[in-house]
Image: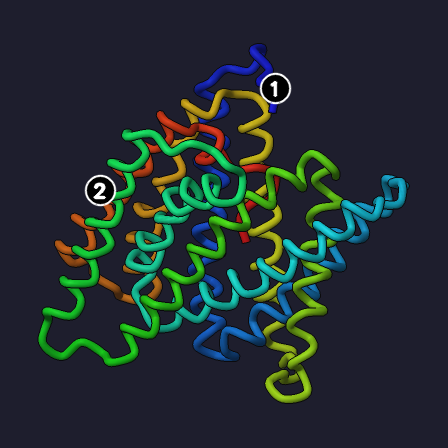
């Protein structure tokens, strides 16, 4: 993306931080919905709301028809995002919000190695060191979780779901880079949600439930938070360099602590805090080596 120097970096940082807050609020709302209707139905119905919203906006611009390469990439990334989001939503149902967010931060580190594997990029010593720091953070969180007396057996399942989701999300970041070269943001948003809806809809005869009327407004709110958060972050990254904005993304951990405490009475353990600091430190070190992999593309998040 080309930065626009007329915009103050301070303004871009504030806008990006607001976008991250909205996405964190969406995660908290999703966690509440998962408890009520489950991860699958939360994601399925959210994709329906988002497809309708994004589709209306996209068609209003009278866009040209996507070419075959773009459509193929839309479908591939949509399928990947389906599993990214489903696993992440599942993990939210089993783990404290701050813990889930902290573990998800490993995605940029995984992306470094996927870029080497899939794109032939060279991994420098700094990136390797950053990965070890991030891995140490994950181990600190896991050891802290399982060393406590009385931890829920489902916690391991929740951690596994978040970590696998982060690995798939790293692959999603690489696909997003290619996708951004072939399509505009509104087209990407529409097709991503449409493909997620179709992919998950294949299992609807077995797992789907009709949406209770009381859930319409909360799901519409979740959709609005996601679209607004992505839009604000995209605006910020189009107007300021990634080096200013990347550190603000880790404010999601702070928002998760606050929202988890306020809405779910979740406390943050010392091991979670220490592990999150190590993971964030590893990501910041990696961003110096490969800033483009740490910088989100349009609607790269789920």
Vertical placement of 80 versus 227: above or below? below
Depth check: give the residue in front, 280 or 240: 280
Determine the residue positioned at 35% across, 25% down.
288
Q: Position of residue 73 (x, y in %)?
A: 70, 50
Depth check: give the residue in front, 78 or 154: 78
Residue pointed to by mark 2: 133
Q: Residues within 10 Å of mark 1 (few under 14, many from 20)?
A: few
Mark 1 and 2 residues: CB-CB less than 8 Å, in contact?
Answer: no
Vertical placement of 266 versus 41: above or below? above
Residue pointed to by mark 1: 2
Query: Quick one: label 1 or label 2, which is nearer the N terminus?
Result: 1
Q: Residues within 10 Å of mark 2 (few under 14, many from 20)?
A: many
Q: Is residue 36 visible?
A: yes
Q: Answer with the quarter of the image where residue 219 lies.
A: bottom right
Q: Position of residue 121 (x, y in %)?
A: 47, 33
Q: Answer with the quarter of the image where residue 229 lies.
A: top right
Q: Is residue 247 visible?
A: no
Question: Which of the image's four quarters has the C terminus?
Answer: bottom right
In the image, which is nearer the foreground, mark 1 or mark 2? 2
Cα separation, mark 1 vs mark 2, equals 31 Å
Q: Position of residue 76 (x, y in %)?
A: 66, 56
14 lies left or right of 153: right
Determine the residue located farthest toward the bottom in the rendered image. 206
């Amino acid at each position: 993306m080309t930065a626009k120097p007329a915009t103050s970096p301070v303004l871009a940082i504030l806008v990006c931080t607001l976008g991250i807050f909205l996405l964190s609020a969406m995660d908290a709302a999703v966690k509440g919905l998962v408890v009520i209707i489950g991860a699958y139905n939360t994601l399925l119905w959210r994709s329906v709301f988002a497809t309708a919203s994004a589709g209306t906006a996209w068609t209003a611009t009278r866009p040209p028809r996507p070419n075959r390469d773009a459509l193929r990439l839309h479908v591939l990334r949509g399928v990947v995002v389906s599993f990214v989001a489903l696993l992440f939503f599942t993990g939210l149902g089993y783990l404290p919000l701050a813990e889930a967010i902290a573990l998800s931060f490993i995605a940029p580190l995984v992306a470094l190695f996927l870029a080497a594997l899939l794109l032939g990029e060279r991994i420098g010593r700094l990136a390797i060191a950053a990965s070890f720091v991030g891995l140490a953070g994950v181990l600190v969180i896991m050891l802290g979780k399982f060393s406590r007396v009385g931890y829920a057996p489902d916690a391991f399942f929740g951690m596994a779901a978040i970590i696998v989701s982060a690995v798939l999300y790293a692959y999603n970041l690489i696909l997003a880079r290619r996708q951004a070269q072939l399509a505009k943001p509104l087209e990407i948003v529409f097709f991503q949600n449409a493909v997620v809806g179709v992919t998950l809809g294949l299992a609807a005869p077995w797992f789907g439930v009709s949406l209770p009327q009381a859930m319409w407004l909360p799901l519409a709110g979740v959709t609005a938070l996601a679209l607004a958060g992505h839009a604000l972050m995209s605006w910020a990254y189009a107007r300021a360099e990634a080096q200013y904005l990347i550190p603000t993304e880790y404010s999601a951990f702070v928002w998760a602590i606050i929202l988890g405490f306020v809405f779910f009475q979740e406390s943050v353990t010392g091991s979670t805090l220490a592990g999150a600091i190590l993971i964030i430190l590893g990501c910041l070190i990696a961003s110096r080596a490969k800033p483009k992999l740490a910088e989100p593309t349009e609607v790269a998040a789920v």
